[in-house]
Amino acid sequence: MKEYTIDCLGEACPVPLMKTEKKINSIEVGDVLIVQIDHSCAMKNVPEWARTQGYNVEIDEVADGEWEVVIEKTK
Amino acid sequence: MKIIWEKLEKNQYYTAIFKNPFTYVTGAILLSVLQIALLASSGNPWGVSGAFANWGAWIFEAVGGSVDKWFYFSSEGAQNTLKGGFLNDTGSIQNAGIIIGALAATLLASQFKLKKIKSVKQVIAAVLGGLLMGYGARLAFGCNIGALFSGIASLSLSGWVFALALLVGAFIGSKLLAKFFM
Amino acid sequence: MSEEIKSIQRSGTRAPRKPKKSQIPYGIALVIVIILIGVALSYKSGNLAMFWIFGIGFGFVLQKSRFCFTASFRDPWITGSTSITKAVLIAFAITTIGFTAIKYGAFVNGLPIPGMNYVVPISFATVVGGILFGTGMVIAGGCASGTLMRVGEGFMMQMLALVFFIVGSLLGAYHFGFWKINFISNGPKVFMPDYFGWFGAVVIQFLIIGCIYVAADLWQKKKMGA
C-alpha cells in the first residue's frame, strides 16, 4: 500500500477533479490518494466523484478553508 | 469568548445551516424561490452581467473616455443609469450583495482563505476567460443568469437556444482546459 | 462533517495542523455591517435596499450550495457527472411555475406582463455569444454569478477574471451596434405562450425539461456507471 499526495491548493474547478481522475488511474488498487484543496466547490465535487466510482472517501478540514480529501482506491 | 465559537461550530443546527454545504437540489429550490420573489417584487427577473457593462463604462469615463455616442448606451434608460452612478444602480448594488453574501457564508462557516494566483497559466486563463464571457454576454443579452436562467423561466425560446450554444462552448472550453491549462 | 471513524489507513507523515482560528466572529460582524448598509440604503431608496438584500441572499445560497451553472454544462463533458445539471433543471421547472403564475396573473388582469425584456431576439448573435460565453466560463472557472461568489470566497484568480469580464463587456457594448444592425434586429422574439397558449407553453417547457433530465441521468450512468 502506497500513499500519494497531489497538491491542488490554489487550483480552480475543474482542475482538482481532473488531476484526481488522472492520478487515481495511475495508482494500484489499495493505494491511498490524498488531494489537498482549498476550493470550496472541489471539496464537494471531488468526494462526490470518488464515491460514485465506489472508492472509500474521507474529508479532513485541515485549516480554515483547506481540506484533504483522502481516497482509497478499492477497486 | 473563544469557547462560544467552538461550541457554536459544533452545534448541530448551526452546523446544518452555516457550516456544512447544502445539497445542489436545496440550492436549486432556494435560488428559485429568490428568483420568483424578485420578479414578483421588482417586475424583473435576476440579471448579473448587464451591470458589468456599466462598470466598464464608468471606468472608461474615469480615465477620460466617453461612451455617449455608443449605440449600446444610447437609450434614455441606459444614460440615466450611467448618470446615476454605482450607488443608484440596483443591478450594481445586487452584484455587490452577491460578493458580500458569499463572503459572509464563507466566514460563518469559518472557511475563508485568500487564494493567491499560482501560475502564469491561471493568469492567462482568467484574462482570456473573462474577456470571452464579457463579450459573449453582450451579444446574447446576458449570462447564465439573465439569458439562461431568467430567459428559460420567462418562457422565452432564446434561453434554450443560448443553452445549446453554451453546451457547445463548454465542450470547446473543456478541451482547451485539458490541453493548455492543466 | 460528522465525526467519522478513520477507516482509511494513512502513513504517519502528516503535516502538523495549523492552529485554527474561528472566523465566526468576523462573520457575525459582517452580518451586522450588511444590515447597517441595508438600513443606510433604505434612506436613499427602499428599492436599493431590497436589491441589496436579494444580492446577499443569492450570494449566500450560491456559496452554501456551491451552485455552479458552469459545472452544469462542463461536468458532463469532463467526468460525465450530471448531478448539478439535474439540479439546474429542477430550478428551471420551479421558476417556470412561479414566473408563469406571475405573468399570467398580470395578463388576465389586463396589466403589462412583467419581465418581458428578458424575452430577447434569437439570432446568430445568440449562438456566437453562447459559444464564447460557454468557452470562457470553463477556462476562467466560473460564470458571472460564480465569479462574483468566488471573489467573495477570496479567489484572486476570479478577481482578475472579473476585471477582464468588465473589459470584455465594454468591448461587447462597443461592438453592439454592429451585431444589432446585422443580426439581432432580424431575430425573432419568441415568447412561447404567444405561439402555444399559456397552458401549451408550460406543457412544452416541462416536456423539454423532462427529456433533458432523463437524458442527463442516462448520460451519467453511461459515463460513470452510477
Image: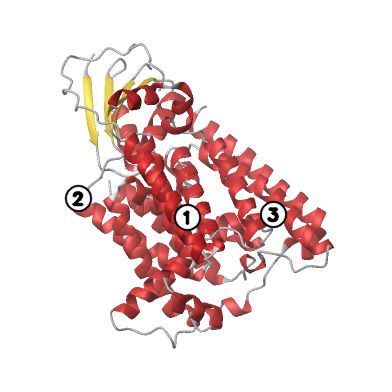
N-terminal-most mark, 3 or 1: 1
Horizontal relation, residue B143 to residue C32: left or right: right
Whole-angstrom CA distance, mark 3 to mark 1, is 27 Å
Considering the image in quadrants, where does the C terminus of chain B appear?
top left
Q: Can you identify the residue that label 3 sits on?
A: C99
Q: Mark 2 or mark 3: which is in front?
A: 3
* Protein chain holding label 3: C
Q: Residues within 10 Å of mark 1 (few under 14, many from 20)?
A: some
Residue B84 or residue A62, whichever sits in front: B84
Specify whether residue C183 is in view: yes
Q: What is the x, y in percent for residue B164?
A: 56, 56
Q: Is the C-beta separation of discs 3 and 1 under 8 Å?
A: no
Count how many numbered circles sit on residues in the image.
3
Residue tagged 1: C38
Give me the residue at 39% from left, 58% from top.
C136
Under circle 2, the secondary element is loop
Residue C51 percent across, percent down from the top left: 53, 58
Which residue type carries mark 1? Answer: Gly
Q: Look at label 2 and name its amino acid.
A: Ser
Of residue B168 and residue C26, the one placed in the foreground of this image is C26
Q: Nearer the viewer, mark 2 or mark 1?
A: 1
Q: Provide residue C94's location: percent of width, then percent of height.
A: 66, 45
Please state which amino acid type lies under the numbered disc 3. Phe
Identify residue for label 2. B119
Q: CA distance from mark 2 to mark 1?
A: 38 Å
Mark in front: 3 vs 1: 1
